[in-house]
Amino acid sequence: MKGRIEQCFATLRERGERALIAFIMAGDPDMAATRALVHAAAAGADLIELGVPFSDPTSDGPVLQRSAERALRRNVSLPRVLELVHELRQESLTTPIILFGYYNPIFRYGCQRFAEDAVQAGVDGVLVVDLPPEEAGELRRFTDPAGLDVIHLLAPTSDSERIRKVLARARGFVYYVSLTGVTGVRAVDPAEVRPMVERVKRQTRLPIGVGFGISSPQQAAAVAQFADAVVVGTAIMRIVEEHGGDADLVERVGAFVRSLKSAIRSGASNASSAG
């Protein structure tokens, strides 16, 4: 039986579409708003990355760091994020959910307990940015049997050996970090990213998602011409930062996500026509 992530990509492939993966930091501006934001984002996005706030987010740029800080001030923790996923599933959300975060909260929670509780809550995958494949054995010992996909990262600096190592262990999809450094600092140049993504695609049947530095519908459309998925996070959370206290916050985020998805459909269609 296919998991939600695999089924989502299979359905999109049949339609000739690319996926939009939208990132939402849990707890910013608060958990009630997060629940509404996830539902709004899911109306346009194909998968949701739900950020687990952490005190030392070394891979995150300034916007996501501040977002995590605001969530931590509200005492948002991994157990509370799992509760949120359970609540979302109880509200009939069927969109695949990937937890995005760092290993320390999972290690403290306990790998076996985390895998069991995450699946029970309705989590489909986990992306642990500071846990490389060769150090993920303890976590994978419990996530693999539970059916929880561990998403691994590739970067512009990944050499052939690194690519082989990641692809041998990859589940769900492969996340290609389009820029070196942290998220949201500079814009991605699709022309620079494309050759590496196409190189990786020749070596795996797994979908390739591209993230970091994609902040506009135009950029999303350009990346959708060669990637299987486009990941957008900082641009969404910048809206939350700037309009967190506004009555129309959820509407603003929902409209932006829908504009991204519309552009991605256009980009994928242009790629098909060119091919």
Image (spheres, rainbow, N blue to C red):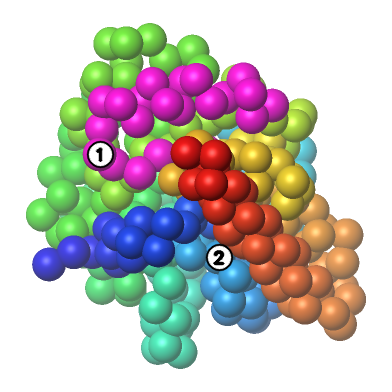
Earlier residue among tags 1 and 2: 2
- Residue in the image at 49% along x and 47% along y: 272
Comparing 157 with 109, the one in front is: 157
* Quarter of the figure with residue 192: top right
| SS at badge 2 | loop
x and y, in percent, of residue 28 in the image: 69, 64
Can I make out residue 89 in this image? yes
- Three-letter amino acid code at disc 2? Ala
The quarter of the rendered structure image containing the N terminus is bottom left
x and y, in percent, of residue 268 in the image: 54, 50
- Residue in the image at 68% along x and 77% along y: 33
In reply to whether residue 195 is colored magenta, the answer given is yes
- Residue in the image at 68% along x and 36% along y: 213
- 206 shown above or below 74: above
Q: Is residue 264 left or right of residue 175?
A: right
**Would you call the spot at circle 1 few (<14 residues within 10 Å), some (14-19), or many (20 or more)?**
few
| SS at badge 1 | loop
Q: Which residue position holds label 1?
A: 205
Comparing 183 with 120, the one in front is: 183
- 185 shown above or below 78: above
Distance from Cα at disc 1 to Cα at disc 2: 22 Å
Q: Is residue 226 left or right of residue 270?
A: left
- Which is closer to the viewer, label 1 or label 2? 1
Q: Is residue 270 left or right of residue 98?
A: right
**Magenta range:** 189-210
Q: Which residue position holds label 2?
A: 45
x and y, in percent, of residue 29 in the image: 74, 67
Can I make out residue 110 in this image? no
Q: Is residue 2 left or right of residue 153?
A: left
